[in-house]
Image (cartoon, rainbow, N blue to C red):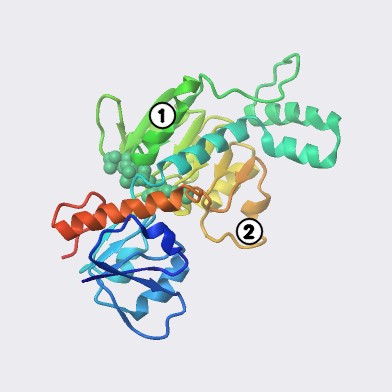
Amino acid sequence: MLRVGYPATISAEFLHEFPEGIELIPLSDKLDHEVEIDVWIPDPYTTKAMRTWPHLRGVRLVLSLLAGTEWIPGVVGPHVTICNARGAHNVSTAEWTIAAILASLKYIPLYFDIQQSGKWTRRFEASAHYTAISGDTRQVYPPVLHEELTGKTVLLVGYGAIGQEIERMLAPFRVEMLRLARTPREEPKVHPVSELDALLPQAQVIVLIVPSTDETHHLIDAPHFKLMRQGALLVNAARGPVVDTDALVEALKSGRIRAALDVTDPEPLPEGHPLWTCPNLLLTPHIGAATPEFSPRALKTAADELRRYMKGEPMHNVVQAAI
Ligand SMILES: NC(=O)c1ccc[n+]([C@@H]2O[C@H](COP(=O)([O-])OP(=O)(O)OC[C@H]3O[C@@H](n4cnc5c(N)ncnc54)[C@H](OP(=O)(O)O)[C@@H]3O)[C@@H](O)[C@H]2O)c1
């Protein structure tokens, strides 16, 4: 019988999608003995999963509940097949992205601060913010108190499962869409990553939704911030290391751009880190996937993959094939 180890933190009631003919073994991150399993579903929190791994024996297949699996190959080595949960994050992470874009363009962080202060007249701080971040010094009357997304140009850096979901959710806003990925293609037009420099100056909103790899490390660095339009909004829903943090802090402090981040480098972001107090920044502490609907969806993705594995069928989400 196939032995499948899963995080003990996941309630057994969520495991009903798993196939017959397996033994489900709950794994604590405080194991003090060896456990023999064939398939490992790591805890979504990397530090907990790393504590469990040294006690596991016999693992041939890893079924991650996350889309980003960058830490796993280095830990389990090349003789283990690794699958991610591609697709399970689409809705939650795409919704976060839309919320972050709208919250930034509608100045929600500023208005929440005004609400806390109980001072209605502070609303005109929004006009000063608009002038400073946009560079638009025209005398607009009545004064600008928020901005519109409709009709803006959005650059999607990464056009995989989540990138495509973001595009679907942006459709009602009639945005001009620019797409960039590793592999260029037509219909819809997807530009190669070599065209990043040419595309950046065209976009008012830039969304990062690529995996963290050697190639995407600091994909956005100091020269790229100089190529962005004044007041462009950079949204990082991908992974922190895709952006050079020092260059980002400088670009935010200088008022060149604004940003919305769900991910940072380093993570967790330590207390006192300059990013916490940067102007023009909306920051959430890596929440992109974690809705009530996510966990059942990710477990179903893993269960479907396991069913294919047991039948000897090709699996859908292999990110590393065992050698
Ligand atoms: N904030 C969160 O909580 C959260 C939640 C879920 C996922 N994520 C992150 O989002 C990432 C994307 O997820 P996904 O499910 O959309 O993955 P996916 O379906 O594998 O798509 C990845 C996209 O990135 C592109 N890409 C890969 N390497 C690239 C490079 N060097 N330069 C330019 N583009 C490159 C791919 O290009 P091709 O199309 O040409 O292959 C593809 O379009 C995950 O890896 C994870 O790090 C974050």
Q: Quadrant of ligand 1?
A: top left
State the quadrant of the C terminus. bottom left
State the quadrant of the N terminus. bottom left
Residue in view at x 61 percent, y 62 percent? 270
Q: Which mark is in front, 2 or 1?
A: 1
Quadrant of the rendered image containing residue 188:
top left
Q: Secondary structure at mark 2?
A: loop
Residue highlighted by disc 1: 168
| Vertical arrangement, residue 87 with respect to residue 72, above or below | above
Earlier-in-chain disc, 2 versus 1: 1
Q: Secondary structure at mark 1?
A: helix
Q: Position of residue 126 (x, y in %)?
A: 74, 29
Front position in the image: 2 or 264: 2
Q: Is residue 153 left or right of residue 214?
A: right
Front position in the image: 237 or 200: 237
Q: Is residue 182 visible?
A: no
Q: Tell me the kind of residue under disc 2.
A: His
Q: Position of residue 162 (x, y in %)?
A: 39, 40
